Amino acid sequence: MSAKKKSPKYIFVVGGVMSGVGKGVTTASLGTILQSKGFNVSLVKADPYLNVDAGTMNPTEHGEVFVMDSGLETDQDMGNYERFLNKSLPSTNYMTNGMVFKYVIDKERALGYKGACVEPTYHITEEILRRLKEVGRKSEPDIIVVEIGGTIGEYQNAIFLEAGRQLRLKNRSDVMFVMVSYLPVPSTIGEMKTKPTQNAVRQLNGYGINPDIIVARASHPVDKKRKDKIANMCGVLSQNVISAPDVSSIYDIPINFEEDGISNRILAHFGMSPRKRDLKEWREFVDKVKNPKGEISIAVIGKYFETGDYVLSDSYISVIEALKISAAHQGLKPNLTWLSAKQFERKAKLDELKDFDGILVPGGFGETGIQGKINVIQYARENKIPYFGICYGMQLMVIEYARNVLGLKEANTEEIDPNTKHLVVHVMPDQKEKIAKGEYGGSMRLGSYEALLKPDSIAQKAYGVGSITERHRHRFEVNEDYISQIEDAGLVFSGTSPDGRLMEIAELPESKHPFFLGVQFHPEFLARPLSPHPLFDAFIKASNKK
């Protein structure tokens, strides 16, 4: 008779004082550290929104939508989890309030609760815990780290906290809470203040929970005096207050945490011993980030940067990290400049691009800034500046080529002008019915699909293989009716779906341009610190040559 498998240990990561304090990178860093100790770790995001998934959330408000292999559209923190763990995670590792509530309500409507009065604090928490058990069943982790989105004191995330409290009641030694809190240093006072963290802990106490570890976020390292004060006022051990100062790179965070002994504190709580001690590869990567041998300048031309008076680069966080990762592996510091596409609708502004080593146009939707992007693409093509287009960035690259090389001046995408004479990019046939019915959530071409590469193309040389699998998120595609005409004019579709119907990669041969390439998929979702993405590597290499 086989021995019964041990239940996983659970770490719940919660945030205090304010949003954006770093719960996501803390969760990802804990995963990296514990994985380096020889444990199988799984990371989970519990999002407090009533959206069923993140696909309908505005990127300027919520940040990037990250797509998993399964096609589930998730919060950008899932991207950090996969990057830090260097592996893909199943869709069970993401849940929203909307997802959980919808499941419970649908079950109630089908008499799944056999006439019981359905309540939040039992049936909703029961469903949350069922999903966490499913994570344990799927990947059989030793440790599951669960990030609870939002900030302590909000109504939205209270049900997740209650689920964690209930789980802890069953076996205290198998569950722990880590609170990430902010310690401000007011400029007029010049002293790091602990009172906001004390108040956040008291709010958490109101849910029947006391943190086991406090990760103290601040502009600079937290001294012993503050650690002792937090410990005394918040009921934790002083050595369980972990200093988390601002860092130049998020990839420094696991190393900083380890310098303050966080893994020792976690494993001591669980009564576990490390199976190995190794952050060697991670440290080597961080060393490359910190000690570049050269620099490279990349312009990222987007439309989701502006939120009020601020610039939100989080809208493209996976693209930005993919660029940083590939640059670091080539010994380069990437100087990234976010530029709004709208400013390039005036062609006089295009000369500002001449000093950049490379230009990237990421994905997006809608009409805003489209002419600006097309002008940028034409400028990059004609001036031999390395260009990388992703999703919409590829579709617009094809439209630009059709307009300015083939002479099809009315070439456009059905998304912008469905009545144009030349629908070079049109809605995918299976999407038309969904759009007509108003089915927008979770209905695009989503998740991992295979593509075949043309031998000796830039794409095939970059990957080094003839078949690839990449993640998608789109409704529109290059119109088959124009493919032969476009290829006759010199643009090569070097990657296609196995049946040859969907154009996955477009490029100009190296004899015509150093790097002019677009992809229908999102390669940034598979770029990781310990395994950079081949196409980003090729783009950085070409840009560095310029």
Image (cartoon, rainbow, N blue to C red):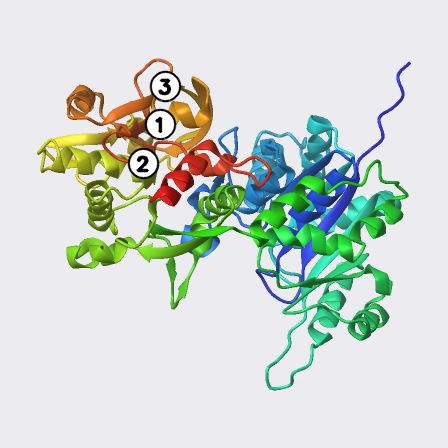
Q: Mark 2 highlights which residue?
A: 515
Question: How many marks on residues?
Answer: 3
What is the three-letter code of the residue carrying label 3?
A: Ser
In the rendering, which numbered label is found on residue 497?
A: 3
Mark 1 → mark 3, Cα distance in angstroms: 17 Å
Relative depth, front residue between 115 and 275: 275
Q: Residue at x 30, y 17 (%)?
A: 501
Q: Residue at x 61, y 44 (%)?
A: 285
Please provide percent x and percent y for residue 231: 83, 68
Q: Are marks 1 and 2 in contact (CB under 8 Å)?
A: yes
Q: Mark 1 highlights which residue?
A: 458
Q: Residue at x 20, y 48 (%)?
A: 375
Residue 283 visible here: yes
Lateral position of residue 293 relative to residue 194, left or right: left
Q: In the figure, residue 240 lies in which quadrant?
A: bottom right
- Mark 1 vs 3, N-terminal side: 1
Mark 1 → mark 2, Cα distance in angstroms: 8 Å
